Image (cartoon, helix red, strand yellow):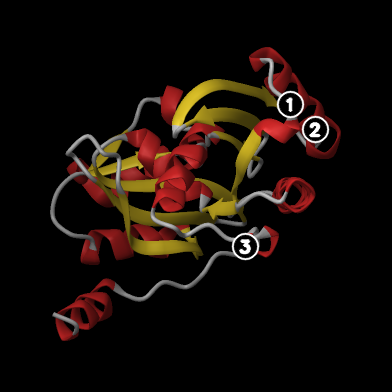
Amino acid sequence: MLMLALETATEALSVALLEEGRPRLELWLDAGRRHAALLTPLVDAALERLGARPADLGAVAVGLGPGSFTGLRIGAVTGRALASTLGIPALGVPTLAAMARAAGPGLVVPLLDARGGRLYTALYRVAADGTGEVSPLVDPLAESAVSWWRRLAEEAPPGPLFLTGPGLRRYAEEARTALGGRALLVPPSRWLPRASEVGALAWERLQAGEAGGPEALEPLYFGRQAVPWKERERGDAAHR
């Protein structure tokens, strides 16, 4: 099955086509604020390069952010239109989770600059068994950088923290100062959100029967406040 994946949360606009969950083609460009003008032509170009048509698509996946309000809106509207017109499943994936998968195994902290001293961020554990499974420890949220570093230092599970994302352009030194030797920076070549990672996570969900309709593509405009780790651990223990 051919899946189209879209990632529009930042200026790094990307489109990927995956077959049975494996990337066949990925195109990206620096869109600035021109997502509305550039996304559809980029989708058309990707399909043309594979000799495919919209009717060949079996599912569409969209990075839901958080990130640029305009970019997320364009991505969601485009994904909904395709899913509705073609009658195919639609899957939304947090952009930060896709960034974490690209970073590699371990405790991963994706970072996007939310302006005003705030970050869009989360904490994930990425499996080291080669599956790339991404498990959230803190769901996407918007938080001041200062309080986020403090929270990570005090409450994150033991071990290195792999920091990734374009937010490091501004906050790398601050993170190193606050977290000391625990802060390890992922190479910059892996910082930008990628549609291929959105598609890989969406494919896992599709295989698990979690596909939805166009209404599933609801962007994370402002993030969500996460359940503290200690409360999460108590909740997990109560269900054992």
Task: Answer whether labels 2 and 3 touch (C-beta < 8 Å).
Answer: no
Label 2 crowd (10 A; few <14 / some 14-19 / many >=20) = some
Q: Please report the residue visible at 31 percent of the width from the left and 46 percent of the height from the top.
A: 108
The answer to which of 200 and 139 lies nearer the viewer is 200
| Disc number for residue 216 | 3
| Disc number for residue 240 | none
Q: Is residue 65 visible?
A: no
Residue 115, horizontal then vertical, whole percent: 62, 52
The answer to which of 83 and 216 lies nearer the viewer is 83
Task: Answer whether labels 3 and 1 touch (C-beta < 8 Å).
Answer: no
The residue mark sitting in front, 1 or 2, is 1
Q: Report how far apart the C-alphas of labels 3 and 1 lie in the structure.
A: 24 Å
Question: What amino acid does circle 3 point to?
Answer: Ala
The residue carrying mark 1 is 53
The residue carrying mark 2 is 40
Q: Quadrant of residue 215?
A: bottom right
Label 2 element class: helix
Measured along the vertical axis of the image, is residue 97 above or below residue 191? below
- Number of residue marks: 3
Q: Please report the residue visible at 68 percent of the width from the left and 23 percent of the height from the top.
A: 29
The answer to which of 235 and 121 lies nearer the viewer is 235
Label 3 crowd (10 A; few <14 / some 14-19 / many >=20) = some
Question: What amino acid does circle 1 point to?
Answer: Arg
The residue mark sitting in front, 3 or 1, is 1
Label 1 crowd (10 A; few <14 / some 14-19 / many >=20) = few
Residue 231, horizontal then vertical, whole percent: 26, 81
Question: What amino acid does circle 2 point to?
Answer: Thr
Q: Please report the residue visible at 22 percent of the width from the left and 77 percent of the height from the top.
A: 230
